[in-house]
Amino acid sequence: MSRRAALSLGIVCVVACGGAATEAPPTAPPPAATLQTRTVEDPPGFAPTSTSTSTSTPTPTSTSTSTPASTPAPLPPPKPVTLPLAAHATGDPVDEAIASGDDAYEADDLPAAQRHYSLARQRAPKRAAPLVGLARVAIAKVGAPMDYAAAQGNHSVLAATDLLRKATKLEPAFGPAYVELGRALLLLGTADGAIDSLRKGVELLPDKAEAHSALGVALLATGHADLSLAELARAVDLDPGSAARHGNHGTVLFMLGRVADALHEYEVQVQLADGDARAHSDLGTALLAKGELVRAEAELRRAISLDPKCAAFHSNLGYGLQLGGKVADAIAEYREALRIDPKSASAWINLATALAKDASTRKDARAALEKARAIDPSDPRVKANLEELDALEHGAADGPRSP
């Protein structure tokens, strides 16, 4: 994965296709719903790793195609995500080695980056930059998503944290050291330390989009969506040509209930990265929340065309189809999601809600919910849906009630 792709946010965490988060978005209610507890498996954001849900059900505004947001003016190309640790063409061999390490890191050539940073460290053991470079290479090799506590207890990240602390002591005004230290502490699950370090990084690097973005991601990952908004908006202002930064901004707007503003950001994200499946999934999922089911379906199908092996995309499309009353098509998408990822609890729950609409398949709905419970016994959605299924079956057994 290229380090040019800025960190992306997520509203919930789910396995397989995409990063971090806290709560599910509000979603439009299904027509003539049977079971009421629903889920969008992969709402706007980044690499998900778990699921959550919400029973909030605002009324859909429309089920017809709407006019997309206006096409934004041409934007500049995105800036590199990697914070530079030194400049080229200074004539200083240490700076040249560090800058070569930055170039290799940006190009995903971690072995070359490590060689260059190690050479710089040998030549200048009291410089902070080589230590920061070696630390971020070590963290990149772990491959953990930039989620809170995603690398808790990891020895490589702990060792990198020690290097970064040493770097901040060698050069207390070197901003990238604080940004990388904050990221490492976030991975280790040290929330307060991560936020403090990233705030220091922003203070030292006020004009660097990646510093603001890293702080915004950390604030959101630790449950402070309201505080993350300003940082992610600032990252967009500083780097307006980055699709990922628009997507991040859209995600936090979406979480705060500003769906129209979020949709605008997702429209820009798609314009900048039309070939990015996740961008289309973000837009489609947000459109579901607004009740724009026709446009949502088109975007979710586009995401699948770009990444047909992502189970969450199929589950999300199934959810959209179910909201539009296309239950048989929805069931087919849920089954495809489960063929790809049989351990997707959300897809099993979504399948159960569709099967429960027909009395003849409620036994299969119960079996699907039991599958979900076996995958995640602590998921409250399973218990809620089983209780609703019990109520439906008992109601059918008792016969129609008098008005």
Image (spheres, helix red, strand yellow):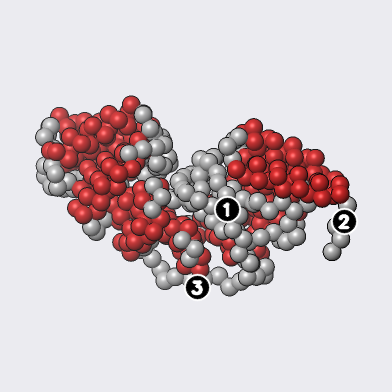
In this rendering, the label closer to the viewer, 3 or 2 = 2
Mark 3 or mark 2, which has the lower sequence index?
3
Q: Amino acid type of disc 2?
A: Pro
- Give the numbered dot on residue 126: none
- Give the numbered dot on residue 54: 1
Q: Secondary structure at mark 1?
A: loop
Residue at left 23%, top 32%? 162
Q: Amino acid type of disc 3?
A: Ser
Q: Does the residue at mark 1 contact the one at mark 3 (Cβ under 8 Å)?
A: no
- For this rendering, which residue is in front, 253 or 193? 193
Screen quadrant of the C terminus = bottom right
In this rendering, the label closer to the viewer, 1 or 3 = 1
Residue at mark 3? 70
From this view, report whether residue 370 is shown above or below residue 399: above
Q: Using residue 129 as the reference point, say whether residue 182 is left or right of it.
A: right
Q: Position of residue 292 (x, y in %)?
A: 62, 66
Residue at left 78%, top 49%? 392
Q: Secondary structure at mark 2?
A: loop
Residue at mark 2? 400
Residue lying farthest to the top in this orientation: 155
Q: Position of residue 100 (x, y in %)?
A: 24, 40
Q: Using residue 354 as the reference point, say whether residue 245 is left or right of it.
A: left
Residue 242's quadrant in the figure? bottom left
Residue at left 65%, top 42%? 382
- For this rendering, which residue is in front, 351 or 26? 26
- For this rendering, which residue is in front, 112 or 225? 225
Residue lying farthest to the front in this orientation: 402
